[in-house]
Image: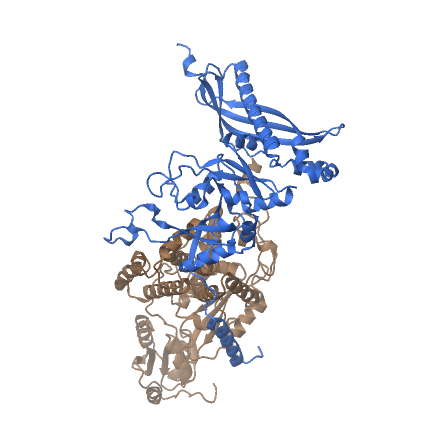
Chain colours: A blue, B brown
Amino acid sequence: MTIPMRYLIRAAASIAAIALLTGCWDRIEVNDIAIILGAGIDQEENNKVKLSVEIYLPAPDNNESGGGQEGMDSGSKNGNILVSSAIGSSMADAMSKLQKRLSRRLYWGHNNVYVFGKERAERGFNDDLDFFLRYVRARERTNIYVTQGKAIDTMGVIPRLDQNLMEALTELSKTEVSIDVDLKTVMEQIVETPEQTYTVPYILTSAVMSEKKHLRNANVPYFRGLTIFKKGRMIGSLDNELTHGYFWITNQIKASTILTAAVAKDETVAVNLTASKSKLIPKIDSSGEWRMELIIECEGNLIQNASRMDYSVPEQLTEIEDLFEAMIKKNVDKSLNVIQQKYKSDILGYSRLFRRKYPKQWAAAKPEWSETFLRIKTDTSVNFQIRRPGALVKQINNIPME
Amino acid sequence: MNDHETPLAANIEESREKLKHFLHDCSDASMYHFRIGEQLPGMFVFFSGLTHEDRMDELRKEMAGWSFHEDNGSLQEQFQYRVAGVCSEEISSMEELVDHISSGSVILLVDGIDRGYAFSLAEWRKRAIEDPAAESVIRGPREGFTESMVDNRAMLRRRLRSQKLKMRGIEVGRLTKSHITIAYIEGLAAPELVKEVEDRIGMIEIDGVLESGTIEEYIEDEPYSPFPQMLCTERPDAAAAGLLEGRIVILTDNTPMALIAPVSLFSLLQSPEDYYERFLIATAIRWLRYSFFFIALLVPSGYVALLTYHHEMVPSALLLSIAKSRESIPFPALMEAFMMETMFEALREAGVRLPKQVGAAVSIVGALVIGQAATSAGLVSSPMVMVVAITGIASFLLPHYSVGISIRLLRFPMMLLAGIFGLLGLLMGIIGITIHLCSLRSFGLPYLSPIAPMMVGEWTDVVMRPPAWLPRKRPRLTKSGGSWRSKPGMHVSKLHRKQE
């Protein structure tokens, strides 16, 4: 090497100095951040917005310190959440006001849940979405929920089984109870549908709290179906039964769903779904009528048989299957009716399917999509098969004497 | 005989005076007067402790019994005639004499002859051949090199019973005059390579060589690199394996450490036991080692980077529990990591240097420093303790101490980079190390070969430990590179089946 050593040393020293003298100027230690676990957005008077956040309190466990100090809240696990809220003219304003009250920097990177109050949802939350999508630290895969009352009421609630309500909600959304709707899905729907129609899970707030402070009432389900959004506003909701129909149509029904059908009075058969596939086939026939063909194919295992029906008799098995088919069809038709006639919003994704298959006709129908949508007839056909009877083949009441 | 050498005197008394002057203050030099054939005065000169004195005594007795007849010429002539069949070498200067006696020979000086007669009776106390302490294996030979060059050479020769195993000797060190042996297999090792090694060693100008480390430092390609460019082993089987791959083994006098060159990074990550264990298991272990190589290098810095800049990348639940345990820690993550890693290195060093009796105390204190006590004292968080412990174990997983220690050293600049620039810094560090490794050479062999430069044919020995029966070509660095090392054929069991 031709460069003398002392120059190399000088160069190395100055590079090291440049790097080291700045220190870790933009470092943010874990101790400096307030980790937001969930955020609630409510409508306030004078068109203001109220932002409430659930912040993780990283207090070390009592048993870890091992000392004889008396615990603050009798050792309950719920001491690790702080709820704070602020009102502002916009989300950003509310957040800056909220920040002023906290000694640590609000950290959105691990936020999993946005809960909107019903009032805010009815006014429309596109402004808030703009903030969440623009703000770099916030994640696009954050789940969105709408709650019946005020969003702040869902904050700080301890669901007992999980660490906090936000975790419980995200976990439940993965099961058959509800669906995952995150910022990304909503954005996609806004872009893809002609009238910005989408659904968001609806949280049941009534009696969320038990008489004990902060503890959730264990006897109330978390969800109350879905809310329907059209043109950025919430226009209504589907109850649990209609939601089920909606799941059937949109192929969102999850395996492990349990279906119960009544054979006769006080006689029921229950089936655990193992697989299900719904297929929508758009069709414009020669007369110019728009139709949709819905084929649902599903199979399941018998998990309870409290009826006279005998699984081992092929005719009776077919009868049970027909029963379920009829039930599903009824459920679907009812949901379709409500979605098409009452809400006139294409949350089913019909427009996307027609656009793909009939782009020209779709383009023509696009300006008045709602009108076109409510006239689309859906032909539902259900094929249900029960594959396995479970460990008990006969039903108890009918076991023949030895 | 050169001009500046002191000639030997013919008169024995004169020789004695000269020797006394030459070897003054050498209290271990011994002179032993006697008469050959009861007539001719003679004198043995030797260093006590280096010679087999019993055999010297036998020699003296035998010589004392020699009888001379006057009609057969002078005593000196008769003596010279008879001694020629016994002695190993004739010498003519004082310097030669000292050379011989310091390597254990006995010099016989005789009155009336200005020459000395050397007898190779070298024999000194040495350590027995023992289990190699630093490179232990579960399966494999249990003998390790010792300090004796003779034994070490014998151990190699025993493994390679072929005249193709050549051992060239060189002497290095003005005062220590250490013997260096360059061993290679003729026809396998490239002759240029042998010459290069010999030339490099020949150029060493130094007072003393006490350990192979000195040789290594003198002849390695890149002295400023933290990575070892020669493999240092005390296992003769590893040395023999190196020889078979066309490498060169350098044995140094008075040290049980043999140097193998050239090496690539991958051969430094392999253990001789890989080849003794079943190949599936050895392959799995090899991969374990590769992954822990990266863990040892990157985990502390990665942890620092994630915790100071990229909280998004930590899974939520983990971040919450880290946040909880870090809540009362007064130091930034970088400081914490630096402190703990330094502490760990200190403990390791203390453990190596301390006498065994104190060792237990160190391990107890060590468990307190890196452990529960440190966490409860609120000095470090428990995830940090885990990180330090994992990296500690990871660095010990590397089979060669010299690689492990270079990785451990590089961890510190990496942590600093991660603390200053986050993952960007970490990446800069990785790129820097990669560039360095790519440019590094060991006696002309690229350090990352066969990955860079890419020699796909030799990858089998990197990505897995190939089964012994798999036909394999010799590494390309060797003279006969590319020729078949094991016969392209079939596994014995298949051959057997075919015969049936």
Q: Residue furthest front?
A: A46
Write down the quadrant of residue B350 in the picture.
bottom left
The answer to whether residue B343 is left or right of residue A389 is: left
Residue placed most toward the observer, B457 or A239: A239
Could you say where residue B71 lies in the image, as x and y percent from the top left? 39, 83
Residue placed most toward the observer, A381 or B185: A381
**From what the image shows, is residue B212 above or below residue B291?**
below
Could you say where residue B26 lies in the image, as x and y percent from the top left? 31, 82
Residue placed most toward the observer, A14 or A153: A153
Write down the quadrant of residue A380 in the picture.
top right
Could you say where residue B387 lies in the image, as x and y percent from the top left? 40, 57
The answer to whether residue A381 is left or right of residue B140 is: right
Q: Is residue A300 visible?
A: yes
Q: Is residue B303 visible?
A: no
The answer to whether residue B234 is left or right of residue B357 is: right
Residue placed most toward the observer, A223 or B169: A223
Could you say where residue B24 lies in the image, as x and y percent from the top left? 32, 86
Specify the quadrant that holds the C terminus of chain B: top right
Q: Residue furthest left?
A: A68
Number of marks in the rendered image: 0
Q: Residue furthest right?
A: A286
